[in-house]
Amino acid sequence: MAVTFIGVRHHSPACARLVADTITSLRPAYVLVEGPADMNARMDELLLGHDLPIAVYTGYRDPERRHGSWTPLCDYSPEWTALTAGRAAGAELRFIDLPAWHPALAGVRNRYADAEARYDEVTRRLCHAFSVDNVDALWDHLFEIEPADGLAERLATYFDLVRGDTEPGADDAAREAYMARWIRAAAADAGERPVVVVTGGFHRPALIRLAGQGAASRSGSAGEGDASRPEPPWHGDAGWPEVPRPPEDAVVGSYLVPYSFRRLDAFDGYQSGMPSPGYYQRLWESGPDEAARGLTEAVTARLRARRQPVSTADLIAARATADGIALMRGHPHPARVDVLDGLAAALVSEALETPLPWAARGPLPEGSHPVIVEMIAALSGDRTGRLHPATPLPPLVHAVLAVLGGPGEERLDLGEDAGRERSRLLHRLRVLGIPGVERLSGPRPAGDAELTERWVLTESEDRLPALIEAGGYGVDPQEAAAAALAERIAGADLDQLADVLFDAALCGIGELAGRVLDDVARAVGAAADLGALGRTLIVALAMWRHDDLFRTSGSTTLGTVVEAATRRALWVAEGVRGGPAPADLPRIHAMAAVRDAVRHAGPALGLDPQLAVGVADRLATCPEAPPDLRGASLGLSWSLRGTTAADPAKAAHGTGAGDAAKAVRGAFVPATAGDWLAGLFALAREEVLHADGMLELLDELVGGMSDDDFLVALPALRQAFGFFPPRERHLIATRLVARRAGGASAWELMRLEAAPELVAAGMALDERVETALRREGLITS
């Protein structure tokens, strides 16, 4: 008895044909395939009669990690032809690789990621030797368009070169040791009957060694092997290997999902796989000549459908050029890159700003020529798989489809229980990334309260796959959305945290616990950006204080965020240093959020006002702190000390002594006055407005500026006084008019016909003209 090892490249028509022919010829007792062993009990489900492409999606979640991965299959996947040909030949079918959730595959998003990409030094040398651009072109050159004669030997030589003497990593070693146990067990059970093993070519050399210790093996198609070599008996393990079980605290689910050529395509960002699945489907079905012809026709039809001029002469030129390129490259038939190069030569007349995308691997580069983009899309194809109606689906799919409803626009009243519940369902689907669920308007973080939402639901062929994959998060929309949000929090930076918390409220998931709450505290505790801390604090505090709409008022989760963000913001603020610069509004808003948190949540959350006042006092008089932060710190200290009649000097010095005029005069430097006032007004607007003599003092300081200084300071001064609402600006104008112009109207002062900057520039110009006239003795009075 012998075991036939077939090393393949995943999603290769040439390998798929070799696998099918070998199994049909040998009619083995067992067909062993690289794939998740925990799916063996569900082999009948996999072979129900689906329209390919499909994939096995596995979702894994435990308190430490979450992982999702795919095992994709299409018509020309060697693994698929192994299963279908094996079933037709009456063989027992087994997947022999570790389950997708296993730690050895923790970094693998796609099980069928071709391993030669990991050993690019060898493939780079091969590409250079054969004068091709990349491994995809190399593969076509060596295997896809060459005759099938000798394919097994060429594959074995290629993968032996790729693997070489390199020791695998720990994860590959664990997978190979496990697969070898399955091979030994199958060989022992098969007796004299053949066994066929189909795995990625990278694993083949190691599996021959591991599984064939003391045993004979074949490495190609039926009938091969060294007949002169004795065949020692196989000594398989006692029984079949056990399928690893996930940890008890883990949630694991594996389901079949419809897949698409778009997701298979390397140009669309697929982790590996071959590019242009639409082309390789044609190659599988019709051979290289028809695939080349069909590719040219598909590109032409797509361009014409988008009103791109493609003439018959262009088409003839593209075919002739592709044939000539193929002949020059020694190809018996035009390969994929030959056809693409021919099309590009015939259809693109101007110089290209980016390299042709098939010269490298990976997603289509930005700035690609529109014709090139359409060519790549035509090669990709638009096929989408469909599951057999009897395919089991996760509970989440049934739970959603039962209540989602048909396409159309919905307007929800969030003041009513029914509207709020419907909103929560739709937000849960939005958070899970379900296609065809889009919100047009509604409440926003730290925005005005809105009691209505508008949604639009549309049909999407990607909805079922997305729902199946989301089923790994939970059995119903609420549980799944909570798990998805927990995952986002674990990887969120502070700029994202406020949005995640707001999404939790919109989903009706107001309380988070355990590790998730620890992740929130970690994100806040590691923050170094005062502005980002402020944004998070503003949203969390608003929801904690008075968000009765989403029932988050008094939330323990949000209270934890408010408390942690307040303390962290004070700590970060005390370390901010910098010279004169435009006022940093996010920084000012952060200090205002600290003030509000201490005022409104301090007693409930244990925030110490004296701690905040102490930090503010030090910052207000720190010469290295930026002007806006010094002004904001003065305002924070002043506002937290309690009364509108409080002495600003006391706020500035923390001693209760000193002169208010002295405190303000010391901070008022014309070049930075507007920035300093912006911070002060943002945090102590009412205190400034109602403190005796404060407006008069500010008027005196501003009025004492030279025209040039005033012109420099004017933009920042306008920004600072913008913190006063219109009613208060009118009050300021009234007092200034009374102080300077007697019975004039404050409305006239506020309704200047010219822009203030223009008026100030005119005043400065007048001053310079007068100075020049005096210098020349033209005026003396």
Image (cartoon, rainbow, N blue to C red):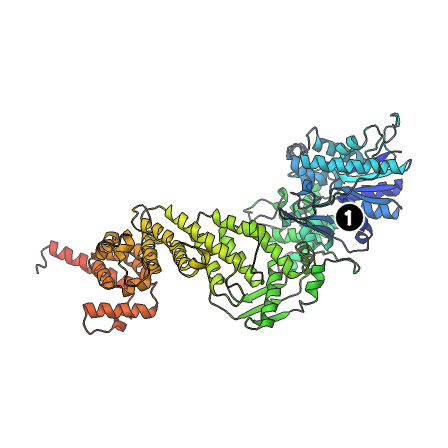
Q: Position of residue 667 (x, y in %)?
A: 26, 52
- Residue 684: which quarter of the image? bottom left
Where in the figure is residue 751, as x and y percent of width and height? 29, 71
Residue 427 can be seen in this image: yes
Judge left or right: residue 120 versus residue 233.
left
Q: Mark 1 highlights which residue?
A: 39
Q: Nearer the viewer, residue 429 or 34?
A: 429
Relative to residue 181, is residue 59 drawn left or right? left
Within 10 Å of disc 1 (Cα), the crowding (few <14, some 14-19, many 20+) is: some
Q: If the image is split into quadrants, where does the N terminus sit?
A: top right
Q: Is residue 18 left or right of residue 318?
A: right
Image position, residue 465 (x, y; %): 69, 57
Is residue 626 something that shows in the picture? no
Residue nearest the observer in this picture, 249 or 211? 249
Q: Residue at x 22, y 60 (%)?
A: 697
Q: Residue at x 86, y 36 (%)?
A: 187
**Which is more toward the observer, 744 or 270?**
744
Amino acid under disc 1: Met
Total residue callouts? 1
Q: Secondary structure at mark 1?
A: helix
Q: Is residue 602 above or below residue 18?
A: below
